[in-house]
Image: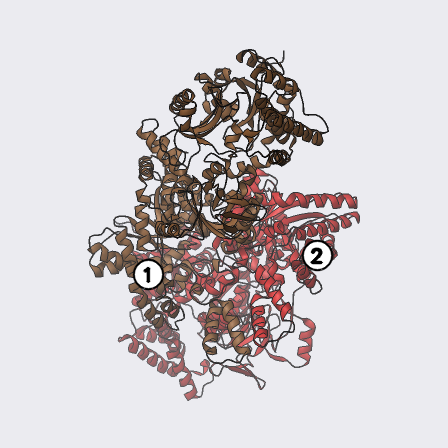
Chain colours: A brown, B red
Amino acid sequence: MASSKRWVYLFTDVEDAVKDCGNEWEKVRGLLGGKGANLAEMTRLQLPVPPGFTITTEACNAYYDQGKKFPEGCWDQCLKALEVLKEQTGGKTLGNPDNPLLVSCRSGARDSMPGMMDTVLNIGLNDVTAEGMVKLTGNARFVYDSYRRLVEMFGSVVYNIDDDEFHHYLKKYKEEKGYKSDPEMTAGDWKDVLAFYKSVIKKHLGKEFPQDPLVQVQEVSEAVFRSWNGKRAIDYRRATGISDSLGTAVNIVAMVFGNMGEDSGTGVAFTRNPADGERKFYGDYLLNAQGEDVVAGIRNTSKVEEMAQSLPEAYKQLLDIAAKLETHFKDMQDIEFTIERKRLYMLQTRNGKRTARAAVRVAVEMVNEGLITKEVAVKRIAPKDVDTLLHPQFDAEVQKKARAEGKVYGKGVNASPGAAVGQVYFDADTTEKMKKEQGKKCIMVRPFTKPDDVHGMLAAEGILTSEGGATSHAAVVARQFGVCCVVGAAEVKIDVEKHEMVCKGVTVKEGDWISVDGNTGEVFLGQIPTITPDFEKQAELMTLLKWADEISASETRKGENNSPKRGLMVWANADYPQDARRARSYGAQGIGLCRTEHMFFEQVRLPIVQRMILAKSSEERTKALDELLPYQRSDFAGLFEAMDGQPVIIRLIDPPLHEFLPSLETLIEEVATMKALKQTNGLAEKEEMLKNVRALHEQNPMMGLRGVRLSIMMPEIVKMQVRAIMEAAADNAKKGITVKPEVMIPLTGHVNELKEIQPELNRIAEEVMKAKGVKFAYKFGSMIEIPRAALTASEIASLAEFFSFGTNDLTQMTFGYSRDDAEASFLLQYVEKGILPKNPFQTLDKDGVGRLVKMAAAEGRQTRPDLEVGICGEHGGDPESIKICYDAGLNYVSCSPFRVPVARLAAAHAALGK
Amino acid sequence: MASSKRWVYLFTDVEDAVKDCGNEWEKVRGLLGGKGANLAEMTRLQLPVPPGFTITTEACNAYYDQGKKFPEGCWDQCLKALEVLKEQTGGKTLGNPDNPLLVSCRSGARDSMPGMMDTVLNIGLNDVTAEGMVKLTGNARFVYDSYRRLVEMFGSVVYNIDDDEFHHYLKKYKEEKGYKSDPEMTAGDWKDVLAFYKSVIKKHLGKEFPQDPLVQVQEVSEAVFRSWNGKRAIDYRRATGISDSLGTAVNIVAMVFGNMGEDSGTGVAFTRNPADGERKFYGDYLLNAQGEDVVAGIRNTSKVEEMAQSLPEAYKQLLDIAAKLETHFKDMQDIEFTIERKRLYMLQTRNGKRTARAAVRVAVEMVNEGLITKEVAVKRIAPKDVDTLLHPQFDAEVQKKARAEGKVYGKGVNASPGAAVGQVYFDADTTEKMKKEQGKKCIMVRPFTKPDDVHGMLAAEGILTSEGGATSHAAVVARQFGVCCVVGAAEVKIDVEKHEMVCKGVTVKEGDWISVDGNTGEVFLGQIPTITPDFEKQAELMTLLKWADEISASETRKGENNSPKRGLMVWANADYPQDARRARSYGAQGIGLCRTEHMFFEQVRLPIVQRMILAKSSEERTKALDELLPYQRSDFAGLFEAMDGQPVIIRLIDPPLHEFLPSLETLIEEVATMKALKQTNGLAEKEEMLKNVRALHEQNPMMGLRGVRLSIMMPEIVKMQVRAIMEAAADNAKKGITVKPEVMIPLTGHVNELKEIQPELNRIAEEVMKAKGVKFAYKFGSMIEIPRAALTASEIASLAEFFSFGTNDLTQMTFGYSRDDAEASFLLQYVEKGILPKNPFQTLDKDGVGRLVKMAAAEGRQTRPDLEVGICGEHGGDPESIKICYDAGLNYVSCSPFRVPVARLAAAHAALGK
């Protein structure tokens, strides 16, 4: 006897599945999918789940492996499971008009992909069982409504017929009858509709809608498998990083009906509020409806609390079950339920998607409730959630004024928080196009959204719909991706064809600016300025990040390659005292990069800088530098004061000098014009400047005379800078401030560059301390941003007391990509084509640049075991890059102040091995 | 008893030295210096060497270590050695007027540094011993001449008094007396001169010239030690790569006198002709003179053969000794000798410096004579010698015509071969400045040269002197550095002050052009065109390189990292069939790089290329490419024909497209001018072109849209190129030619780039073979020139069937140096300051770029053990870089055809572990 592989598990067989998966619940979820595993688990918890079974994800993969055929034994196992369902449903049988079994067929991958794959309800209805159902229920209207739904879903899912063919007919039918909504439809009406729907199937297929319920089950199951590789599902997986190889399971569940009258209903709910995390049961339901009506956001729902009146017993049971589920799964649950003639059935439970704000509050409160540990809480928050919480919000004063001036255009449900300002576009393709090709900030406006619209939603700053509630497609997706969203703004009449919307007589056309408040649900005309939220007032977030810091600080790394024992620290890049203060309030433990040249561009200073550059003699240059010294000293003094007790890394001048002079192209044009017009007034000066600029011009300035090269060719500038740094530090030290200056030499490529310049700078530092009569520790270090520096790190470390990876330049050189040019010319297309998995300027390239970072850290520490190693490129605030830095044994990452909280969380995740 | 270290070895103690050095002759040379070791060795061979001893190089290093003091015990050992000299010279004692010992004190480092360090003769003379000498010799003239020489050398060497103070006085003295040359000076005259010289010493020192001979010995010995770190010596070591840490020995040798009358003399000679290698005793001598007179080239010497008449016995003995020395040292010897009253003394022997031509001939003939092995012969030739032999020569026809037209300006001794055309400068500083700052080709013209002039000689294309012979300073140095040189052109009157020279009434001023023939000794007015020598007619060189190839081919490498077992092959970079033919005739075993875009610049093609670039549609572009296809096909066809049976690597288009369009700056200027002048005619076209050029403009084109990036964004071009390559290969294959096309994809940085483009190109190759009905093997490979490609070589090798390191770009990216800018802006100064040991664009940077090459070769072969790995950057022809490539396990180096012979030799050297 061939011992066929097990492809099918009844919900009641959950113990078998757990055993087959070696008692690992994650593997059970992998095998049965999230929905199937949780339905089985709820069955084990003796909750009211309709009988059913799951065809495994392995069957899905086998289906593809065998050229889109059910694997051997799979269908036989399904038939056997249907036999058991007969027993579990008290004798109901597929196709038996006297006691018909109807089933739903639902997709369910390991990770939730809401709406991305297919579901078909009411399978088992045909002309015969429908008649039987009418007899059994005495409710012909319900039966023909259900039957037409089956035909419609079947046509759409199995045969890929456009929904609109069905919807247009229904809409027209209702108009002709003068109906405003579905409940007005009679049994006869639905029968008419059903007949038309069947004719649509016949038109497309050339044959009748299949009457055999087993054929229905099999065809739908295959369609669900196929939907795993539908465009929508693939796009979603790309966006969320879910692997293509997981496959989806198929759940066949005995139907229960929420549309059997006013004592029936269906709903979705969360055990806590998914918008703000409040510990309060929260959801929507509809009386006399099937689940799809709620999820699609087509009909306006009622709040789940209202069930306390309409269906009090079921509501009480639901609250009990919700509490039980949360305790069992130790996370906020998102549940689907149906009440059939007062009897409650659980159709799904899963960890609920939530806003960033809710995620943080739920995690922190669950720790306080003793439900989870701090580590679990920290792990559970995605870095991007923290990011979202620091997103800009509207300026409250301006918003208040706008309200007062009647600029509130409409109001809907605050489905996903944030503040979005953008130009209006009425479809996903245009939105995406405007964003990508013209870099526009867009608000996508739709009556409601469908999975096909996701690419536009991702490109938009904000989303506005006129239909649907907080659990509609638009709301769920927007929350997941952190896009600001307002749904169900019913007063707004959207005309997609005419590319405009009207509300209270005001027309907004394509390209007009609006502002959408995802926190209040308001929509404003025009652009409202945004401000950054006050980090320090977000108590739960502060708590969570404190826990994250504790995890990093108490971490004991293996200490390979002399890497530090504690986890990663988070420092910040800050050029000015106010930035440093913000960084510190955001939790930074040091300044990893202060760019001194930014200060050179300030209005009063630039002319002095230009005089310095164009100086004809060393005296003239020194004179200009003497003027700059007090400015720089006071810049640094403020920085040291703000960072009392913490290290401050100041980078010596980095950019090529021509950046401080007028543009070559402009000068050529001006001189040519003046000459052609024989304008002599001022020509000589222009020509002189052109000569100077041309002399400094470089073919490839990124690889030119800058950084330490410039300092070696023209040491006066850095001598002034080191003097300014040390004088500022000394003055502060005398005031009792603990100063930890670290001077960073940029663009080092050869240890001899340090040998050439460092002793003289060191001498200046000692001279200043002696003159000021004060002593403090200081360091000289090197920015590692040239591949050769990384390759010869063991030599560089003989002089450098710290390394700071400048991963922007290191990425440029390692890839040979000019950052000024690459993104516009080929890089974004490389990412789109999948040639590069990510933009390497956003996420550190682990195999190339990351390898250099790891090598250099390890080899540098061979020379100098206490070498301080960090990163100060933009990657320092990117969670994935932070993980790479942790693995490379770095001491800290330094990023912009706004990214510090995200980085603190990501550093803790790295320590937790997440 | 303190067992003091041994600092002094008598020549007769050579066995002790050999024992103390563990029987390693090289260590003996290291300890005693080349001169000391060979004097000792000649003593052991019982040749007539004056008694003497050597203070070791270790004493020199100890002298510096102890703050310029003789190490403990050293002086005592010297005193003891002087005691032994007393015995060996039959009782001569320093300072004893009855039997005075006079000694010379000569520097002698391990490696010969001719004229770079100091020598003092006649030590031991003072007012008392001089009187004694007069009594003993009866030759007051000789004695006072010798004494004044001692004072002069002492003043110059020990007290750093300018030579000119002595020389001017002597010149004036002779003028006043009406003397034309030194021999006219009488004993009284020399006494007068001596008195003046002593007064010079007193003036500078405030005390008398030291009369104690032991003080003289000690002061001179210390001065010799100090001369190791004199500017001249340091400069010389920088230029020749001799280590600073070796130190110099000091040789104290009993004086013999060539200036004791007409039966005395002194000379230098070579056992073979150092100019052409002929096996014939060759040299110069002077009767009644001391050695310095010959070497300085101040007096015109006689040919050594003439000694057969003047001093027949000594000459016969000299010839015997010369033969003996050559057999003993197995190399051509450069000897110094003195005849004192008919008695021959050997003062030095060393391996003789020689021209490249002589080096090759001597090596090959010595193999044929059974004196040395082929391996020794190959090792003995420096790659730069081969380079010299391929240096340009004057076009014989033009030269003949110039002679006929009387353009021969002057004639001198053909001291160092080659043909030099350049502008005349009359001092070293100006020569160097003109070369460095203005890139001029210079001929340095001097009456004679001194060690201080070396920097100018190195900067010059050629050297011309009016004084001195084939062994003068100018001649020796020029030969060593391969600079063309004519010396002793006595008719040419050089006026250094006036910056001009006159010959036969024709004045040549600074900056005028002349042409110098180092092979014939002729100097021509104006510029004579040069031609490349006919490699195939240089029989000895062909033989030597054949041996080099045999060594490489029979080499068995250890095969680490799957490196090939045989030594390095040498391939060539060639774009056109004629280059390929030349490369093959020079011994190339394949084409490592054919740059296809060079062909795009040809006059008839450029307009088509521009049409292709500016095409508004894919059809328009394809149409232009269709026109280019036949051109490219015929380019490649010729290449395959020339390289029948050998691999040909063709690189697909590499440069950014804007290189084929007019310059942005020029267009801006033109458009601005036309607009200002309201010229409408043609303005629209110019503006259109400006728009196009601006669209393609990049901030850092070196890191921009080029190479494989361009191919991915605009695949039509490379598709055409691969079709052209494969069609050309197929057509040739059908004619019976063995084609081995290898298609190289440039600028790869990520394996996915190959995945994106290679399958389509592969398809075209298969399609062409099918259409042409012919089969041949071909490869696709990748240029490794982006650091990331090297860092991810194991991945790249999954698609690439060969690697070719583009070390020009790899050096650019690894250092972050833009080659277009760096050399002018800081790189040359970096090399001068010693920040970089060499220009990394000339010699591969072993620690950085070389490390990447080694890693990539090893890791690529982990993926694909038979990966073919080579280098096609300009480093492929640089001997030092070739060694690095060998050590990295490469299969071949590819270089320009002219460098192929040099590379063949360097490859053999690598195999021999030289």
Q: Which residue in the protein does label 2 denote?
A: B620
Q: State whether residue B419 is above or below residue B863.
A: below
Identify residue type, mark 1: Gln
Q: Chain of mark 2?
A: B
Residue A871 spot, x, y in % from top left: 39, 47
In the displayed structure image, the side of residue A775 where residue B29 appears, left or right: right
User: What residue do we see at 66% from left, 51% from top?
Assistant: B718
Residue B231 spot, x, y in % from top left: 40, 66
Q: State whether residue B65 is above or below residue B215.
A: above
Residue A113, visible in the rendered structure:
no
Of helix, strand and loop, which one carries label 2?
Answer: helix
Q: Quadrant of the N terminus of chain A?
A: top right
Local packing at callout 2 (Cα closer than 10 Å; few below 14, some 14-19, many 20+) is some
Q: State whether residue A458 is above or below residue B133.
A: above
Q: Which residue in the protein does label 1 denote?
A: A721
Q: Quadrant of the C terminus of chain A?
A: top left
